[in-house]
Amino acid sequence: MALFARTREDIATAKLRDPAARYGFEIWLTYPGVHAVWGYRWAHWLWMRRLRLLARIHSQLIRFLTGVEIHPAAVIGRRFFIDHGMGVVIGATAEIGDDVMLYHGVTLGGRTTSDEKRHPTIGDDVVVGTGAVLLGPITIGAHSIVGAHAVVVTNAPPNSVLTGIPAVVRPRSTALHPDVDYTDPGIYI
C-alpha cells in the first residue's frame, strides 16, 4: 500500500476509534500512538532489510518521542491503533492482526530469554484495555476483548472476554452486564 494511502487509513482509523478526534490534521500532528505506528513501520522496513542497528536506533528514538516501545521485528497488521500510547511495550516476536486497538500501558511481553517465539499473538479485531499485560507465546483469538489491568498468560479462543489477575477467559456471549455493548471499544476508556 502506498505511503499516503496508509497514512490516510491510519488517520481514518484514529477518527473511528477515538471519539475525541476532531479532524485529520490534528491527528497527524498530535497523536503519539499514530506517530509510534508510523515510526515502527520505518524501523520494521529497516529490520527486514537487515539494517538492524539502524532499526533499533530509530525505534529507540520513537520510544523517546512517543513513550511507546515497539520492537522493529514485531509483525503488525493494518489499522492498528494505540490510544494515548504512553507506556505501551510490544516485544520482538509479537504478532498483531488487523483492526487491533491497544490502550495505554499495555505490555505484550515475554516470559523467557530463549531465542524462540516468546511474545503474544493477537488476532484480528481485538481490543486490549488499559494496563493489560499479556505474557508469553500465547494466542488471543479474533474479536476478543482484554479488560483493563488483566494479566493474561493463557490462550483465548476467538470471541472471548478476558478479565482479572490472572485473567479468566469467558465467551463474549456471557457478558458481565446485560445492558452493556461489549463490542463498543469506547467502554474501555
Image: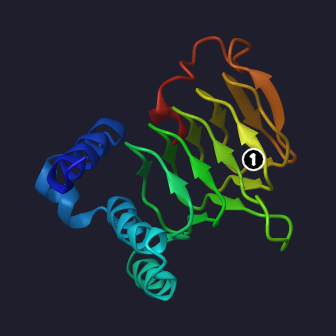
Tell me the quarter of the picture where residue 160 sits: top right
Q: Is residue 41 found left or right of 122 in the rendered image?
A: left
Does 89 sit above or below residue 57? Answer: above
Q: Position of residue 151 (x, y in %)?
A: 79, 51
Above or below, comparing residue 74 to residue 127 in the picture: below
Residue in front for this viewpoint, 108 or 41: 41
Q: Is residue 156 left or right of residue 143?
A: right
Q: Closer to the camera, 75 or 110? A: 75
Q: Position of residue 113 (x, y in %)?
A: 83, 74
Q: Position of residue 28 (x, y in %)?
A: 19, 60
Q: State the residue at coordinates (36%, 39%).
A: 17
Counting every numbered tag in the picture gives 1
Residue 155 point in image, percent of width and height: 81, 38
Asked whether 152 or 123 is in front, the reply is 123
The residue depicted at 60 percent of the width and 50 percent of the height is 95
Q: Which residue does the image show at 47% across and 26% down from the upper left?
A: 184
Tell me the residue at 60%/36% (across/down): 123
Counting other residues with Cα less than 10 Å from the Cα at mark 1, is it few (<14), some (14-19), or many (20 or more)? many
Which of the 4 image quarters holds residue 66? bottom left
Q: Is residue 8 left or right of residue 70?
A: left
Mark 1 = which residue? 150
Q: Which secondary structure, mark 1?
A: loop
